Image (spheres, rainbow, N blue to C red):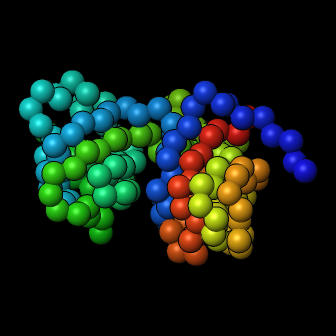
Amino acid sequence: MIQVSLQGNKAIKVIPSDTILIPNILPIFSTTAVTGTTALTIPVGNVDPILSVKVGDTVYNTTNNEIALVGSVASMTINLAASASFTAGAKSIVVYQTPTAAGGGNTQLNGYIIYVGVTGNVSVVMMDGSTVVFTAVPVGWFQIPVKQVNATGTTATSIVAVPYL
């Protein structure tokens, strides 16, 4: 059995995506009552927090369990990256920094260990960039560092990520 070292005081719900890495755990912005599908209108009163949102950050739509990248930010609007859209209607969002290899305090170079809450297959991108599908992963800790959980090929649900140290 592999022994791992976890940064146990921080975790993030994983929304599987075939193109977006598991974001950094600490949110940089969150709000409710957001409207729009590709251009997300932020309610008045959130001016200061939205200033910290940058192109390439990861947006979680926590109401509909959707994920996208920020394409641009203008005034009180977060525009999603090309081809991305969220379900219509009011929603809650959380914005996280997307990990990069180039620093700025938003790197997660060691990857994440994931917890699988409901058994199933898990398609992951390993730290070396290779994709592997693990079949019939049981409930519990999946103790291999990964940087992404793919939507395609993943049937397990209730997945949570914790930084691997």
75 lies above or below 146: above
Q: Residue at x 54, y 44 (%)?
A: 100
Q: Is residue 158 visible?
A: yes
Q: Residue at x 24, y 36 (%)?
A: 31
Q: Is residue 142 left or right of residue 156?
A: right
Q: Residue at x 34, y 41 (%)?
A: 94
Q: Residue at x 16, y 43 (%)?
A: 33
Q: Report the front residue among 43 and 74.
A: 43
Where's residue 15, x and y in %?
Answer: 46, 56
44 lies above or below 34: above
Query: What is the number of callouts on the image?
Result: 0
Q: Is residue 100 left or right of residue 133?
A: left
Where's residue 30, x and y in %?
Answer: 30, 35
Query: Which quarter of the rendering shows the C terminus?
Result: top right
Q: Is residue 15 left or right of residue 143?
A: left
Where's residue 124, x and y in %?
Answer: 64, 63
Q: Report the front residue among 101 and 44.
A: 44
Place residue 118 in its image quadrant: bottom right
Q: Is residue 70 visible?
A: no
Where's residue 114, x and y in %?
Answer: 65, 50
Q: Residue furthest left?
A: 44
